Image (cartoon, rainbow, N blue to C red):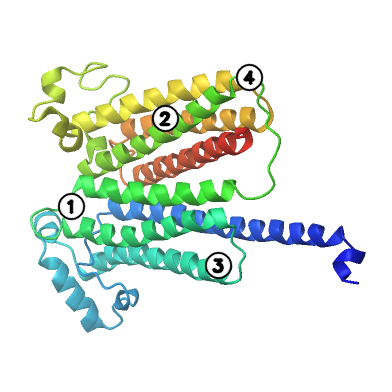
Amino acid sequence: MEDWLLFPHPVPEVKHRATEANAVGVRNWLWIVAALVFLMVLVGGATRLTESGLSIVEWKPVTGVIPPLSEKEWMDAFEDYKKIPQYKELFPEMDLSGFRFIYAWEWAHRLLGRLIGVVFAVPLVWFWATKRLPSAVKPKLVFILALGLLQGGVGWWMVSSGLAHRTEVAQERLAIHLIIAAFIFSSCLWVAGGLGPRRESSAHDHVGRLRATGLLLLAIVFVQLFMGGIVAGLRAGLVENTWPLIGGAFIPPVDALFPKEPWWSNIFDTPITAQFFHRMIAYVIFVLAALHLIDAGMNAGGRARTGAVIVFGHIVGQIALGIATLLLVEPPYAGTPHLLLALAHQAIGMAVLAVATLQARRLVHDLEA
């Protein structure tokens, strides 16, 4: 008689434990990838703040992993940098030591991007080949891989915009580069959040509304991150360093916000307008998060309520950091302390995306039929 007839119960149980262990392994791998993307965004922010992004004027996906090693190679790379407008107009007094500093930031940024590609692709092939991936997860992981490949091309597309006629990269390309990184980060968390055992729903009433507000909040956080990229690209945080007023009013005059035609182009091209929209979106996020918190507190419990509290707390902290970054741009706070404050603002922005993603995924996963 076959073994499975003699022992009918342990076999499915063992298979279940193996399936659960596979899901946990895939989930932990995606957490690691997400952590690396988080670090990548911070290194990218530091690269932007230190004006280092244009220090490497060539795109060599494979051989570019090796930095200059000899004095001659360093001088050749420096001479290439001297040909672009940024050096001629902003840093004509820069010496080789200064160039090495900015080169190190951009090289580290690109190296980390390559590392993330390897850390994602190699385990993906292994999990797939050994049949450890749930079928529903496979297309999602292929989508994330495609986003990663796209991100490499977009990164060079962004850098190339600052090599000929500008002293910095185009702000809209910077924002697109940032938002793709955010999508990759959020997607890894979303897929990871759906792996593992399903838990009982902790919501009692109005579960559809909780889910809708959670998803809406996540969508607006993405919009805000895009606007943050525009603000960074325009250096819009260096103008109108007052709060809660901007340009002497809570809502500046129309001619100050929309001096160019078409009107919508000012959102992406006019510093005060970009900063104004960045502020207004923050207020919308705050109100929506507060309503979500009240709703979860009244109509849910457990993880749904706890998640709403965590999301709201992160958003309050992020707004406070944003205000501090804006107000402390002037001496004696400028320089390294302000750079660290700006990086902290960016880090908490990604943390807001993380908790908003996990809250939305939790509501979808726990509350779906």
- Provide residue 156's location: percent of width, then percent of height: 24, 61
The residue that appears at 41% across and 26% down in the rendered structure is 285
**Label at residue 168:** 1
Question: Which sits earlier in the primary sequence, circle 3 or circle 2?
Answer: 3
Circle 4 sits on which residue? 205
Q: CA distance from mark 3 to mark 2?
A: 42 Å
**4 and 3 marks in contact (CB < 8 Å):** no
Q: Amino acid at mark 3?
A: Trp
Circle 2 sits on which residue? 319
For the N terminus, give its image quadrant.
Answer: bottom right
Q: CA distance from mark 3 to mark 1?
A: 41 Å
**3 and 1 marks in contact (CB < 8 Å):** no
Label 2: few (<14), some (14–19) or many (≥20) C-alpha neighbours in 10 Å: some
SS of the residue at dot 2?
Answer: helix
SS of the residue at dot 3?
Answer: helix
Q: In the rendered view, does 331 fall on the left or right side of 148?
A: left
Using the image as rendered, state which of residue 103 and residue 328 is in the foreground.
Answer: 103
**1 and 4 marks in contact (CB < 8 Å):** no
- Provide residue 369's location: percent of width, then percent of height: 62, 34
Q: In the rendered view, does 181 fall on the left or right side of 196?
A: left
